Amino acid sequence: TQNYRITLLPGDGIGPEIMAVAVDVLKVVGQQFDIQFDFQEALIGGAAIDATGEPLPSATLDTCRQSDAVLLAAIGGYKWDSLPPHQRPEGGLLGLRAGLELFANLRPAQILPQLIDASTLKREVVEGVDIMVVRELTGGIYFGKPRGIFTTETGEKRGVNTMVYTESEIDRIGRIAFETARKRRGKLCSVDKANVLDVSQLWRDRITNLSQEYPDVELSHLYVDNAAMQLVRAPKQFDTIVTGNLFGDILSDAAAMLTGSIGMLPSASLGASGPGVFEPVHGSAPDIAGQDKANPLAQVLSAAMMLRYALDQPQAADKIEQAVLQVLEQGDRTGDIMSVGMNLLGCRAMGDSLIKA
Amino acid sequence: TQNYRITLLPGDGIGPEIMAVAVDVLKVVGQQFDIQFDFQEALIGGAAIDATGEPLPSATLDTCRQSDAVLLAAIGGYKWDSLPPHQRPEGGLLGLRAGLELFANLRPAQILPQLIDASTLKREVVEGVDIMVVRELTGGIYFGKPRGIFTTETGEKRGVNTMVYTESEIDRIGRIAFETARKRRGKLCSVDKANVLDVSQLWRDRITNLSQEYPDVELSHLYVDNAAMQLVRAPKQFDTIVTGNLFGDILSDAAAMLTGSIGMLPSASLGASGPGVFEPVHGSAPDIAGQDKANPLAQVLSAAMMLRYALDQPQAADKIEQAVLQVLEQGDRTGDIMSVGMNLLGCRAMGDSLIKA
Ligand SMILES: CC(C)[C@H](C(=O)O)[C@@H](O)C(=O)O
Ligand SMILES: CC(C)[C@H](C(=O)O)[C@@H](O)C(=O)O
């Protein structure tokens, strides 16, 4: 029997509901593949603010550090929106990324044939789209200094943030991206704004240099404005995309929305050492929280990514992914992906159907 | 007779061809509305680099400053891509924006019923889309200091750019945006990343404050990642969008691509005083330059925007816009917007057809 310590961070909104489904699915798969999960739950986001006054209590970070992987659901909600920025739920997420040094964020955007009509794009444009965005997650303008709101000599306020990348930061995310592309279709597109930004020039230089070590990967470069256009114009041209923290935030969301069903998309955030964090791309959906309406599939697929990337249990991961495809094939749908003639299920019932599958 | 001095900056690639058509159209409209144009041509971009070694010779800036408006075509091309960044054609464009203090960039993205099938999005999603992106153009990370590539104590290189906005910079673009929204459908969406960036928090505060002066405009806020998603998910929800330089660069291109026909989209860049610059959203298309294949309509519509915003000649602007609709209605198409059953025309022939119309 393999034993793994998994930290569960249910967070806010629909988080606890979808987490419960993912845990049930993991337990069943664990029995089948002789894997034992030791789950510990910890607080993050709004739930942590309510209980402790902080979005990321140090006990949570400690628990995460002592585990083999972290499964996160979603954070945030209207309730905490009026707090000062660094005290908000988002601060917990940024603190977790920094605290665990999760520099590599993998966000797949894949069109499932069963859900292709959910896309706002024409079928022929999105059919077969399968993009992996590799986003740098602990650098760039999210963490660069100086930052703050300062008062100038004339008494005027001035807001400042700094976009910074060092060579070693670029290289380590670059390597993950080349290796990811190598395991996929061998195409990597690096996105920057090198025609305007110095930091992007350094980015482009280093990625270009690195490509000599990966002769089997075809590298291209796009400016971020053009990349946003190309995602809308012809998304099939992309295989793997690598980019900085801010551009990755924007482009991975745009890519996710091409599928029309972000309730389906998982993500992985990996560090140099220590546990990775696995979470859905979607948010905490406070408007439907507690109503058994949420789509648990992105959370379940995040658990599958955890099995694959953190625990080296690809067969268990495959099993979960197959079960997801099977319930979709059967016509099971939560409200967000419902269409005529399908079976509308709640969050719990979708979990039950998955477990049967 | 009204007299206007207009600086023409044909630039690179297809620039000269599409500029020639716009000038012909302006001449004809001038005769009809008793407007006399005094055109002076000046160098910018790659053409200026080849002739003078610089992308924006000071003579060009002087000529622009002495004119009532500037009509720009497009700059850049593969030929100059290997030059060091500040010597490249793009440097000329950034220098022009800074030199003329063009802080407000207006980029409409409108779906024309005749071209709706060119969109990669489903008809029902884009039908009637009519978005105006108001992008701040002389501040933010494009011009913030410090900037550069520095060497750290450990000998490693570090690329740095700074995103900065002062209160007065935010206020002046905010006012243009509220006034623009007021003349349109009265809805303004401000886009920032206030959950992460200090500069965005200042941005959001000031825009919120300003809204008290515009009670007739309905203000909303979106984070930039969500805005990129919403443009793909449900673009009809937007009327006017206001945002900073970098986010505006990305989102205006994404919005433009929703139409599927960026060869149709004009833009205006306006300053506090002094002449504005009017130019197509598309680039210099070096691959089809000199082949009489370019679509001149965005350039012609940029001339119409010039008549409307800089020269206060709305009737002449209307006339041009009507002519564009009429040739489309007749089925005239350049290659980029061609579809079955339409008449394929070259750049010149499209110009002739416009003049007839
Ligand atoms: C919530 C926010 C801080 C976060 C980010 O900007 O990284 C989110 O948008 C994401 O992409 O995970
Ligand atoms: C060419 C480039 C410098 C420019 C920009 O980034 O502003 C372009 O993308 C634009 O949007 O006009």
Image (cartoon, coloured by chain):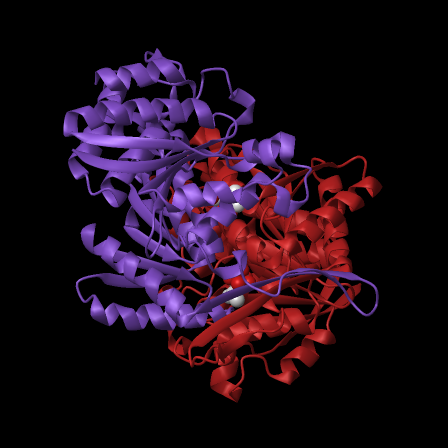
Chain colours: A red, B purple
Left or right: A108 as drawn, with respect to A173: left
Q: Which is nearer the eye, A346 or A174?
A: A174
Q: Is residue A18 above or below residue B322?
A: below
Give the image location of residue A136, x and y in percent.
65, 57
Q: Residue furthest bottom?
A: A52
Give the image location of residue B9, x and y in percent.
44, 34
Q: Which is nearer the eye, B112 or B147?
A: B147
- Can you see residue A130? yes
> Which quarter of the picture shows residue B31?
top left
Which quadrant of the figure contains the N terminus of chain B?
A: top left
Name the residue: 75% across, 49% down: A206
Which quadrant of the figure contains the C terminus of chain B?
A: top left
Q: Which is nearer the eye, B197 or B226?
A: B197
> Which quarter of the picture shows residue A162?
bottom right
Q: Which is nearer the eye, A22 or A181?
A: A181
How many labels sit on residues? 0
- Can you see residue B254? no
Left or right: A213 as drawn, with respect to A113: right
Give the image location of residue B235, x and y in percent.
34, 46
Give the image location of residue A151, x and y in percent.
47, 80
Left or right: B335 as drawn, with respect to B197: left
Name the residue: 34% across, 67% down: B171
